[in-house]
Image (cartoon, rainbow, N blue to C red):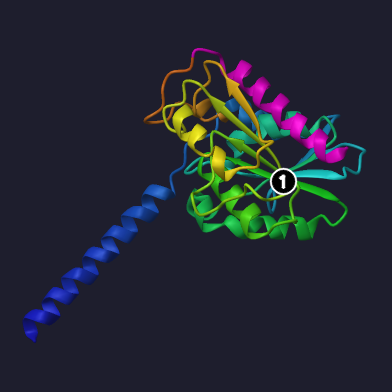
Amino acid sequence: MRRLRIWLGLLGLLLVLVLAGFVAWASIPSSPMPEALTALQSDAQVEVETEPWLIFHPTGREPSVGLILYPGGRVDPRAYAPAAHAIAAQGYLIVIVPMPLHLAVFGAERASQVQAAFPEVRHWAIGGHSLGGAMAARFAYRHPGTVKGLVLWAAYPAASDDLSSQNLAVTSIYGTQDGLATGEKVAASRPLLPADTRWVAIEGGNHAQFGWYGPQQGDNPATVSREVQQQQVVAATLDLLAQLEE
């Protein structure tokens, strides 16, 4: 019995150390670039709030279409501020949702809180980058009809989240140089998405340039600038939101 107690104590200590290591690892996200921090400032076109979420509201308008955006895994949500600012400037409400431990898998249901906070928005889209996109797809799968659109930035749904039969406007945007959400992985998700899904390939784009947070382990070097890739991401996302507005 004494040996058993010792072994159980050691096992418990090991689990505590593993958990502490995981929390420490997840709590240190990729830092936003200076361009991202600049985009958090309000201007003549967009009003920005940073609590309780990162909220980008077009100045002087009451948007009927909104986009809820989930960040990529271990990426500071502020890294997506430039794209959110640019989209909001065209008349849409954009809400970037921070996640527990910077991992959207622990906060996939948070979109419901955003929707409740903005009852004036009639049509919602949800989307995200990488893990954030997968969890956005999970929300759409679990809450059919509550969102009208889904935009995937270098992301694809899990095999258990089959959206192929849902009445959902979907755009999947991916980079041809992406070393993480590769073209093969994105293509394999086609049976899980509606037949009329729009597929947008960014030639030379990689994984990290969907945000403003620097390079990412396992990714490939991009052959286009971050500015060019961001312009294409914003344009394709705006096309999806315009469908909902119509």
Q: Between residues 17 and 188, which one lies in front from this camera angle?
A: 188
In the picture provided, is 84 more to the left or to the right than 93?
A: left
Name the kind of residue labelled 1 in the image.
Leu
In front of the other: 103 or 137: 137
- Over which residues does the magenta segment extend? 223-246
* Residue 214 spot, x, y in % from top left: 48, 27
The answer to whether residue 27 is left or right of residue 161 is: left
Q: Secondary structure at mark 1?
A: loop
For the C terminus, the image quarter is: top right
Q: Badge 1: how crowded within 10 Å, few (<14), some, or many (20+)?
A: many
| Residue 109 found in image quarter | bottom right
Residue 170 among those drawn in magenta: no
Question: Is residue 39 among what the camera can see?
Answer: no
Q: Which residue is mark 1?
A: 168
Secondary structure that dominates the magenta span: helix
Establish if 68 lies above or below 202: below
Estimate the x, y position of residue 59 in percent, counting from the top left.
88, 36
At x 8% / y 87%, what residue is drawn? 1
Q: Please report the residue visible at 70 percent of the width from the left and 59 percent of the height from the top.
A: 112
Residue drawn at x 87%, y 42% is 63
Residue at image x 91%, y 44%?
A: 62
Residue 50 in the image: x percent, y percent?
A: 69, 46
